[in-house]
């Protein structure tokens, strides 16, 4: 492998490690310091700031990666599980991602351009459509269920504090949403 490709691969690995550590740190404590993230990631401050020149850019990077992960997860789950189980598993992962977003939602909303917001929303909408269509084909959810309405409902989950009581509430609300979608009434 040429030297430049090794450097690029190393830089990508550092960036990914920073994002993974930041995701966990921000989910645990939205006020986590950049210094604590640097230490946990095992990189220098210069490496962090080369990839993410501000706290806002780091938070947005974590959010984008989270969206990319969720979008890629939908077809993977559908290939491995029955559609309704895949959809529920995906929703659990979506709710988990809300733990990170809960404390930094203001940064995400303020820092995202309309175009970036539209891109992430559209990609999540495609994943939800894919999951819902598979569930409709198996008769597990009502035909004609609206993916945008679904996203509006689950968007409320991100406003719930990520503590034990909040986690229990998220599970109850997801069950309620799936009962509402169910074709078997």
Image (cartoon, rainbow, N blue to C red):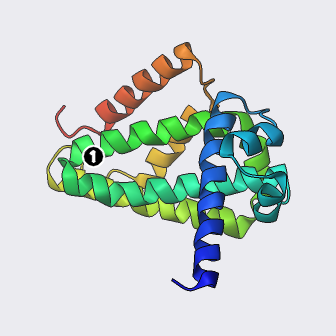
The reply to whether residue 11 is visible in this rendering is: yes
Q: Residue furthest top?
A: 165
In percent of width and height, residue 169 lies at: 49, 19
In the rendered image, which quarter contains the C terminus? top left
Q: Is residue 52 left or right of residue 78?
A: right
Q: Nearer the viewer, residue 25 or 84?
A: 25
Q: Residues within 10 Å of mark 1 (few under 14, many from 20)?
A: many
Secondary structure type for disc 1: helix
The reply to whether residue 144 is visible in this rendering is: no
Q: Nearer the viewer, residue 155 or 65?
A: 65
For the point 53% across and 15% down, which residue is it?
A: 164
For the point 40% across and 31% down, which residue is it?
A: 174
In percent of width and height, residue 28 lies at: 65, 28
Reading the image, the residue beneath label 1 is 86
Q: Nearer the viewer, residue 17 or 106?
A: 17
Dividing the picture into quarters, in which one does residue 24 lie? top right
Dividing the picture into quarters, in which one does residue 183 lie? top left
> In the rendered picture of this protein, how many numbered marks are placed on residues?
1
Q: Is residue 146 left or right of residue 67?
A: left
Picture layout, residue 172 above or below residue 18: above
Q: Is residue 53 left or right of residue 160?
A: right
For the point 20% across and 47% down, which residue is it?
A: 81
């Amino acid at each position: 492998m040429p030297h430049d490709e090794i450097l690029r691969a190393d830089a990508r690995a550092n960036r990914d490690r920073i994002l993974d550590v930041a995701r966990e740190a921000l989910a645990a404590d939205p006020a986590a310091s950049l210094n604590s993230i640097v230490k946990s990631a095992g990189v220098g401050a210069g490496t962090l700031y080369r990839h993410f020149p501000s706290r806002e850019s780091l938070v947005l990077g974590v959010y984008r990666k989270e969206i990319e992960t969720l979008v890629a997860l939908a077809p993977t789950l559908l290939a491995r599980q029955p559609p309704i189980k895949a959809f529920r598993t995906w929703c659990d992962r979506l709710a988990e991602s809300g733990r990170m977003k809960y404390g930094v939602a203001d940064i995400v909303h303020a820092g995202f351009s309309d175009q970036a917001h539209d891109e992430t929303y559209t990609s999540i909408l495609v994943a939800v459509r894919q999951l819902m269509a598979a569930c409709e084909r198996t008769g597990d959810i009502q035909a004609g269920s609206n993916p945008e309405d679904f996203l509006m409902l689950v968007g409320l989950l991100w406003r719930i504090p990520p503590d034990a009581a909040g986690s229990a509430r998220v599970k109850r609300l997801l069950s309620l949403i799936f009962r509402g979608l169910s074709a078997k009434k």
